[in-house]
Amino acid sequence: MKNIKLIMIAVAVSGFGVIAGLQSCQSTKSATASKMLKFNFEKGKGYDYEMDINMDQEIMGTPTKIGMTTYYSMDVKEDDGNIKTVQTKYDRFKMKMDMMGMKIDVDTDEPVDMKGEIKDPFEMVNRLFSAIKGQQFSMKVNAEGKVLEVNGFKEMAETIISSMGLDAEEQAEARQKMKSQFDQQFNDKVIREQFERVLYIFPNKEVKVGDSWEKTTAVGSGLNGNFASTYTVTDIEGDMVTLEEKSVIVTTEEEVKLKGNQKGTLIVDSKTGLVVNADMEMDITATTNGIGIEMKGKTKIKGKARQ
C-alpha cells in the first residue's frame, strides 16, 4: 500500500488532467493591445487534446522515471452565457513506470487481459487504467475556468468494474477492492481538482502586456495542499496571449509533505480561452512515511479543434 501511495503522489503532482489547444492565425504584434481573456469554449464545438508528462524521480537513492500521455476529447453541450457544460471522454491513456518493484505498462490501445483472478495490487492498477478508454463524464465550467461540478463517475465505476470479467459472487472481494481503488483516483472531487489546474487560469477581464493575477488550486488526489500560481501576460500577438506561470506548491498534512515550484509558458487563444501550447517544468520534494522523493518533471501540451 505504501508503494501504491507513492504512485498516486507522482500522478497527482504531475497534473494528470487536460489542457486545450487550438491552432489559429496570428497577426502583427502590438505592445499596446489588450484582449478579453476568459474560458469561452464554443457551444457545439469539439476539441481534441494530448498531454505528455515525463517525471524523473529519486527514491531512497534510486532513480526512477514515469511517462504518461493522455488524450482527451471535449464537446460543449450547453452554454447559459456564463457556465459551459462540457462532455469529456478519455480517448487514450499511456503510462509506463518501473519504480521500487512496481511495474505499470499501460496503453489503452493495447488493452490488458481482463479475465481471471487478480493476483496482486499492481495488476489491479493496470486493469483500471486499461479500462478507462472511452469512458465519459461531464463538467460545468465558469468564465474563469473554475470547475463547478463534475458528473458521471459513479456510473463510470460500475461500467468499468463490470467490464473486467470478475464473477460477482466468486470474486466479490476483488470487485470491492477494485471499486474502492477506482473511487480513490477517479471521483468527482479529484477530477475537479485535476482539471482546475489547467482550466482555472483566466482573469475574466481585458488584459494587456504586464498584467498579472493570482489563482489558488488544490494539489488534488486527496492531498491537502495548494498550488499558489501567478500568471503574467508577456506578449500579445493577434489573438494569441502568452502567459508566464510561476507556482509554489505546498501541502499542510503530516502524512504527505510536498514542497516545490512549477514554471512555464502558456499560449492562449483569446477568442475561446484555449491553450494553444504549454511547456511546463516542475521541481518538487515529496516526503511520505519517511521516504523522500525528488521529482523533476516536464509537461508538453498540444491540441486542435475538431472540424
Image: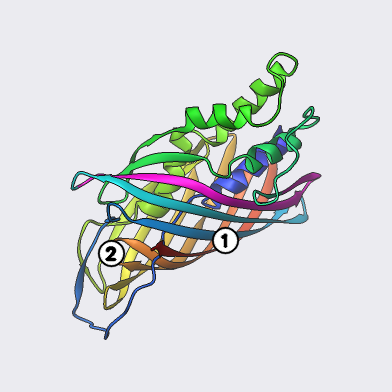
Res. 289 visible in picture: no
Compare residues 292 and 74 and report the one nearer the observer: 74
Task: Give the CA distance from mark 1 to mark 2.
Answer: 27 Å
Indicate which disc residue 52 carries.
1
**Magenta span covers which residues?**
82-105
| Residue in the picture at 27% in, 66% down | 270
Q: Position of residue 21 (x, y in %)?
A: 41, 64
Location of the C terminus by quadrant is bottom left
Nearest-to-viewer mark from 1 and 2: 1
Considering every residue shown, the one lying at the far top of the view is 169
Q: Which residue is mark 2?
A: 212
- The one nearer the camera, 296 or 164, is 164
List x then y, in percent, for residue 60. 76, 49
- Crowding near the residue tagged with mark 1, few <14, some 14–19, many ≥20 C-alpha atoms within 10 Å: some
Label 1 residue SS: strand
Which residue type carries mark 1?
Asp
Which amino acid type is shown beneath numbered disc 2? Ser
Magenta run includes residue 72: no
